[in-house]
Image (tube, rainbow, N blue to C red):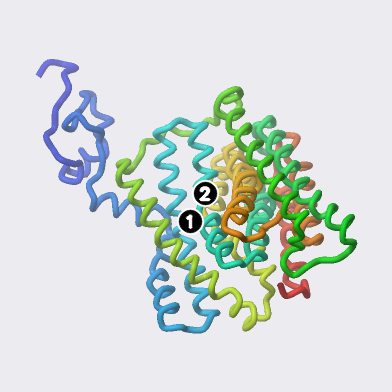
Amino acid sequence: MAEGQPLVLNYSDYGSLPNEAAYNLNNASTPAVLNDSPLTPNKRNSLKIILTCSWINCLLIFIPFGYLAHIFKWSDTWIFTLNFLAILPLSKLYDFATVDVSLRVGQSIGCLLNATFGNAVELIVSIIALSKGEIRVVQTSLLGAIISNLLLILGMSFVIGGFIYHQQVFNQIIAQTSSGLMTLACISLIIPAAFNFAVNGNTFNDNGGSTRQLVDLSHGSAIILLIIYILYIFFQLKTHSNLYQIEEEEEQPQLSLSTVLALFVIVTFIAALSAEYLVDSIRGMAESSGLSKTFIGLILLPIIGNAAEFTTAINASARNKMSFAITIAAGSSMQIALFLTPFLVILGWIIGQDLTLFFQPFETVVLFISVIITNYLILDGKSNWFEGAMLLATYTIISLAFFLYPMKL
């Protein structure tokens, strides 16, 4: 064979090749072509890759137990706990599939996909809760996801990266843009609270203050936030895409595109079932445990949706990729504040559920504090472990406050 001529290997997939050939063909001096198609794993190897992509996948065993708990009507505490544990690995599988897809579409779009599908679990849980009229659960879970990303995930990233590298730097322009957008999202919640106070005084309704004026204000604000989000995407992908080019190691997709799409469909179906069982058990769980729906929604439920972001951001900071960690944590918060929340408000408008942007005053103040301290610490483009400790301390104080909060909504 002449030098430089491609070696054609007539195999249907690399699962039938020896391991050495299957995974190291790229190192060969002579290029290889597999039936004129990219090197992709067979179904058996794809399943192995999926199941071993993270240690958290061991929790997949709780999926059938969560289903059985619902079928045989176990206690609400057991149903909540088992389905809570079942959804955790599903969030990580979303992240794994998203990363595999993002490697095919470029870095800027990849970061956007990571943030979008990283919040898929929150979206599924929120849609189901909204359809059942659990307005407080929807509001607190969205708020909790934002706070968890800003304080817990970012704080842990600063701590881990700071201990390893003493001080880390990241893209200051991305940080400033994120700060501005989060401030805008915070304003969109403060204005309805101030409006309610001006109109109704210091009163609060159990249904979330859903007066006609507040509903109309929330609908209009949601539309504006969605427009801002679209403009942000245009800013990120078109006019200023060079600012979002983050250095990352060269990686190749591990799965075929059809396998990834099938994974998305299967995980979405299972997550929807588990989320429905979980939402149905929240009321009984709150009554039997003595915890408020506010604490469950704001502290416990975000753990489900943020599991993937947590591990991804921590790993990025440990590899001195703090810009990527900031993009994951802050980007996820922006997705929730500027896309998920207004989208759910509009969806509630369509299906007849009055979800508004009017949160309890205490919750609005907590979000404001979280945004302020995060903005203050990231605007200089540098981070260290002590700044991370301050973010974690703020999150701990907030968690303690909501644990002791007497209102059982």
Q: Is residue 161 visible?
A: no
Residue 260, image x and y in percent? 35, 46
* Disc 1 and disc 2 in contact, CB within 8 angstroms: yes
Among the 4 quarters of the image, the one containing residue 8: top left
With 123 as the anchor, is 26 left or right in this view? Answer: left
Which residue occupies 61% across, 28% down? Answer: 235
Observer-nearest residue: 45 or 179?
Answer: 179
Residue 3, image x and y in percent? 16, 16
Among the 4 quarters of the image, the one containing residue 394: bottom right
With 398 as the anchor, is 251 left or right in this view? Answer: left
Name the image quarter holding the N terminus. Answer: top left
Q: Which mark is residue 118?
A: 2
Q: Which mark is residue 91?
A: 1
Which residue occupies 64% across, 81% down? Answer: 287
Residue 108, image x and y in percent? 52, 31
Of labels 1 and 2, earlier in sequence is: 1
Q: Amino acid at mark 1?
A: Ser
In the rendered image of this protein, does residue 298 appear above or below residue 367?
below
